[in-house]
Image: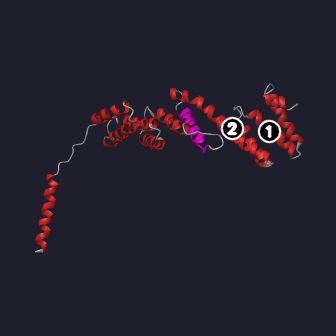
Amino acid sequence: MKKFLILTALAYVLAGCGGTDVAPERSMADIYAEAYENFNDGDYADAAELFTEAEAEHSTDPYAPDALVMAAYSRYMDDDFSGALIATDRFMRFHPGHQDAPYILYLRGMCYYRQVSDVRREPGMSVYALQQFEQLRERFPSSEYAKNAENKINILKNYIAGKVMYSARTDMKRENWTSAITKLQSVVQTAAETVMTPEALYRLTQCYDAIGLPKQSSGYADMLRKNYPDNQWTKKLDK
């Protein structure tokens, strides 16, 4: 009797499975069309989900990379930077040689760039953004996106140098001369093209004077006069 009940129950389960309607797979074109409609309506979150669905369900379709690009861009437009970065990671993992790779690197940089904030609180997004833009410039120097990134690279280098200078000034106020000197020298050595370099040289003269090393102070003063003769920080040397 127990065996009969088990077999009967199993028969009902199999019958139920056989009678269930399985939704047919939607075509790439259908999902894409709906996704674009949402995107054009400004519904970026739903558009991103649909573009992601299109790429996941039709990963071998020639338009799968395009769907992934649009998924990343939709999340970016929705200020979902983490989601956009996940989509770009997937793109670069599966389509590193695709023609849209330069754009994806640019979009990655912009995801970090948009999160750069106050120089005193910024949690490192500027460094990540700079890395992406420099990678773009190195790998695809002729790309239109590399040219767009160039200006942001300059902005970010100045921004990062500004963070170091802020920290060095704080060290100087606390008379933590060794730490201040290390930071100031890093600006001179790694960010020489930034607007912060003249001030860094001037502050180095102050630091070395403070610890009783006039020879080193004089050396940085000469460097400042030689490379930035008309700069405001050079003029401060003789005041």
Q: Which residue is mark 1?
A: 203
Question: At 60% from the left edge and 44% from the top edge, which residue is drawn?
Answer: 124
Where disc 1 sits, the SS reads helix
Q: Position of residue 16 (x, y in %)?
A: 15, 56
Give the position of the C terminus as an image quadrant.
top right
Q: Callout 2, which amino acid? A: Gly
Q: Position of residue 77 (x, y in %)?
A: 45, 35
How packed is label 1: few (under 14 Cα within 10 Å), some, or many (20 or more)?
many
Q: Which residue is mark 2?
A: 162
| Quarter holding residue 158 | top right
Question: At 56% from the left edge and 34% from the top edge, which residue is drawn?
Answer: 138
Q: Position of residue 109 (x, y in %)?
A: 53, 37
Report the coloring of the rendering: secondary structure
Magenta segment boundaries in residue numbering: 122-138
120 left or right of 103?
right
Q: Position of residue 50 (x, y in %)?
A: 34, 39
Figure check: 180 above or below 34? below
Magenta part, dominant SS: helix
Residues at marks 1 and 2, CA–CA distance in whole angstroms: 13 Å
Question: At 56% from the left edge and 32% from the top edge, which residue is drawn?
Answer: 137
Residue, far top: 230
128 left or right of 120?
left
Q: Is residue 125 magenta?
A: yes
| Quarter holding residue 216 | top right
Work out whether residue 143 can be spotted.
Answer: no
102 left or right of 180?
left
Where disc 2 sits, the SS reads helix
